[in-house]
Amino acid sequence: MASREEREAFVTLATNDTYALGCLVLGNSLQQASTTRKIVVLVTTGVSNSMRNQLSRVFDLVQEVNLLDSRDSSNLQLLGRPDLSCTFTKLHCWRLTQFDKAVFLDADTLVLRNVDELFDREELSASPDAGWPDCFNSGVFVYKPSEETYQSLLHFALTQGSFDGGDQGMLNIYFRDWATKDISKHLPFIYNVVSQAFYSYLPAFTQFKNDVKIVHFIGATKPWHHTYNTSSGKVIPLPESGHSEEFLQMWWKIFMDLVQPALDPTLGGLVGEL
Amino acid sequence: MASREEREAFVTLATNDTYALGCLVLGNSLQQASTTRKIVVLVTTGVSNSMRNQLSRVFDLVQEVNLLDSRDSSNLQLLGRPDLSCTFTKLHCWRLTQFDKAVFLDADTLVLRNVDELFDREELSASPDAGWPDCFNSGVFVYKPSEETYQSLLHFALTQGSFDGGDQGMLNIYFRDWATKDISKHLPFIYNVVSQAFYSYLPAFTQFKNDVKIVHFIGATKPWHHTYNTSSGKVIPLPESGHSEEFLQMWWKIFMDLVQPALDPTLGGLVGEL
Ligand SMILES: O=c1ccn([C@@H]2O[C@H](COP(=O)(O)OP(=O)(O)O)[C@@H](O)[C@H]2O)c(=O)[nH]1
Ligand SMILES: O=c1ccn([C@@H]2O[C@H](COP(=O)(O)OP(=O)(O)O)[C@@H](O)[C@H]2O)c(=O)[nH]1
Ligand SMILES: [Mn+2]
Ligand SMILES: [Mn+2]
């Protein structure tokens, strides 16, 4: 029988080549942190073959998922909710039933140190969302793959929708006792620190900064939207993104050292200016 | 023996006449919500006699606390930490040992509905801070008055200081297991909704707005800094305070209906423009 390490996985998702660049940085950051678990990326038809080749150099498994032709997608059209299709794509992570347990990580997260201890937690464990902390942030969560749960989530999403139009609003209603029931399902905030936290409560950020394990670049501006000065080796943050420059610099260091050199030149053009 | 209702209290604090106006609105909001518990305000010498008279019309007890001449204060000077004196003033709430249990409320909070169920919680119960949600926000907390705890907190504050220079940073280190130990000590966020929450996660704010029980106007701009148009009966929010206009309007309605009419004309001048 396979060892525990082989039955547990980190899982991320990209629906296009741009987000796939985020996955490449994330995957490398997991390797740098010497994870002993499998790492998996879900891709849709929007990810090019060239990019899939890149992904397969870093990930143990590049799993195609496709909702666009499925009955679910026609249901979404029927319900007039095509906006939920990205939400539904994330739900596919529950179908990876070759694993006993998994940790989903958004493509815009960055792992700063080994976080394999997350696999000791149960479904659904997640960190509080800094905006409304009785909701969990769905950029990092521990879950148990299960076809049954997938079907149940899908049914729920189709009938209830999502209060924020995304997976977070839907998952928070489905796993609605998260805020009140079991403290062990509250991952410490250091497992999902929004890169803007230094702005909302600077003294706490300063106090706990060295404990941060996973950074999450939430919002419309992503790390790859900033520019990078190749001669100085420094990121040039866009004004008003609110991203911590220190964390951005870490993202770009991995990108420049480990991702960019191997990229097809046409793919590099997806990223800011190099 | 006194009834449970008489042995439990809501407690707030003002060190000057401006914050005392906040206490007056808060006290009235508790009365409007038909609390069955006692309501107490701690004041320092910075609060005028005229304002104390106003406070005693609304509060069951106006308790003078004075740190300026105390040994503690000279200790603060000694430690070069005079900035902590306001922090220390809040700690005085633990000395109200005539009560078995108490709920501290910042002077910049507003109670929208009855919250007497808070007295079923144990020390230290508080809501997560939206900025760094593994810290609790110290604007609303349930505690047990105790001279011993007070001395212990004072000693801790003198020796450890506070990572944010205020009571929140100090209390979060003293009660450091809040984030990880007991979910029942996590008050739902609706007991301490920062008035800026609609900005940080609008869909959640919209979804849960009608459940909000206590609003907290954190930050440098307080409700009394905005202006109010007496002919239209509408608050005119300062730009960039980030305060929800709806909540501000509730604060001002209580202020104009119940507080302002009884004020000494010289005190009214403390508030925006009337
Ligand atoms: O066009 C998209 C949008 C999102 N995602 C995936 O869905 C996650 C959640 O979206 P995002 O991180 O942009 O949301 P935020 O964290 O900013 O709320 C991303 O990290 C990706 O893994 C994707 O693949 N393509
Ligand atoms: O000059 C001051 C500052 C603060 N406070 C009291 O301490 C609480 C905490 O300060 P504040 O609410 O201004 O801090 P914030 O919630 O914005 O962090 C106030 O609500 C008051 O009860 C006071 O009486 N006088
Ligand atoms: Mn994200
Ligand atoms: Mn306050």
Image (cartoon, coloured by chain):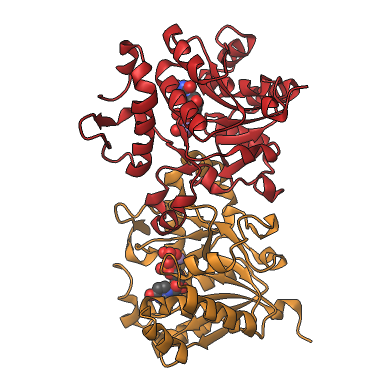
Chain colours: A red, B orange
Q: Position of residue A18 (x, y in %)?
A: 39, 20
Please state if B201 lies on the left or on the right of A158 as rendered.
left
| Vertical side of B244 occupied by A66: above or below | above
Q: Position of residue B115 (x, y in %)?
A: 64, 63
Q: x, y percentage for residue A233?
A: 26, 34
Above or below, B192 relative to B106: above
Quarter occupied by residue A73: top right
Viewer-closest of A16 and A120: A120
Whether residue B20 can be seen here: no
Left/right placement of residue B31 relative to residue B242 reads: right
| Residue B15 seen in render | yes
Front-most of residues A265 and A271: A265
Residue drawn at x 45%, y 55% is B195
B27 and A139: which is toward the camera: A139
Q: Is residue B249 above or below residue A18?
A: below
- Residue occupying image coordinates x 48% and y 73%: B160
Q: Name the quarter where the N terminus of chain B is drawn.
A: bottom right
Q: Residue furthest left?
A: A231
Q: From the top left corner, tell me how far across and down residue A28 is, in percent.
A: 47, 27
Quadrant into which the C terminus of chain B falls: bottom left
Foreground residue among A113 and B78: A113
Q: How many marks?
A: 0
